[in-house]
Amino acid sequence: MSAISENLARINDIILKVCENAGRKRDEVKLIAISKRKSAEAILEAYQAGQRYFGENYVQEFLDKVEHPLLANLEPEWHFTGHLQTNKIKYIADKVAMVQTIDKFATAEALSKRAEKEGLIVPILLEVNISNEDSKYGVMPEDLLFETEKIHELPNVAIHGLMTIGSPDLSDVGKEFQQMRHLLEQIAENSPNPEQVKELSMGMSQDFDIAIEEGATMVRIGTAIFGER
């Protein structure tokens, strides 16, 4: 068994145990393997070990991988998990299952316009700057309801939930993830399609267990699967 396969097996075992301890079902949590700056060979190795969900952060790198001969005939589910510039939207709108990092109305509007041209409705998550750090992108919690109301009016994007990156200080992460759960409940209540707004993408290699305990439906893990970048 390769190192990537072993890492995936270990992480999936941890996810299962945390879910059991939290009274949740394993299939309530989707593991997104963050494969940025990793080779097509590494992604293929993870795919062959059973991993199907992958997250990419950079548009050109993502496009190179989608078209790579090793991956072109596979059927992974790609999520865009990096900061998305409006001038790059046209390259990925028809290639991703979800954009997890919509941080303002202008980006959502540009994505909706492109999706309309492609005949698509693109699922999105709104990125929340829950830790209030200047170095992070994301809607501030107090602005979230206002932003979601505007984005709900766009015809070709669909809000499926929220995404965040917790504080580096793990002592703060639990309460931040709790707040994210409450924010998800609030925007679902105010959504025209509340049953659709159920995804909570939070937790990475260092804190995914805490995220699952607090209700994450997606955890984004890179280093613990593929090693240091």
Image: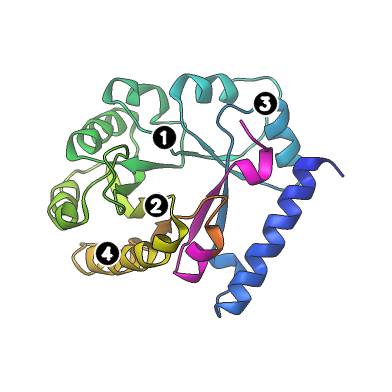
Say if the magenta span includes residue 181.
Answer: no
Q: Residue at x 19, y 43 (%)?
A: 154
Q: Earlier in the sequence, mark 4 or mark 3?
A: 3
How far is mark 4 from mark 2, CA to CA?
A: 17 Å
Left or right: 84 in relation to 25: left
Q: Amino acid at mark 3?
A: Ala
User: Disc 1 or disc 2, which is closer to the eye?
Assistant: 2
As for residue 225 lying within the magenta part, the answer is yes
Residue 93: x %, y % from top left: 38, 31
- Position of 66 relative to 109 (above/below): above
| Quarter of the figure with residue 5 | top right
Q: Which residues are magenta?
A: 210-229
**Image depth: mark 4 or mark 3 in front:** 4
Which labelled disc corresponds to residue 40?
A: 3
Rounded to the nearest whole Å, what is the CA distance between mark 4 and mark 3? 36 Å
Residue with the mark numbered 1: 82
Q: Nearer the viewer, residue 140 or 193?
A: 140
Residue plotted at (79% across, 49% down): 6
Q: What residue is pinned by disc 4?
A: 183
Callout 2: 10 Å neighbours few (<14), some, many (20+)?
some
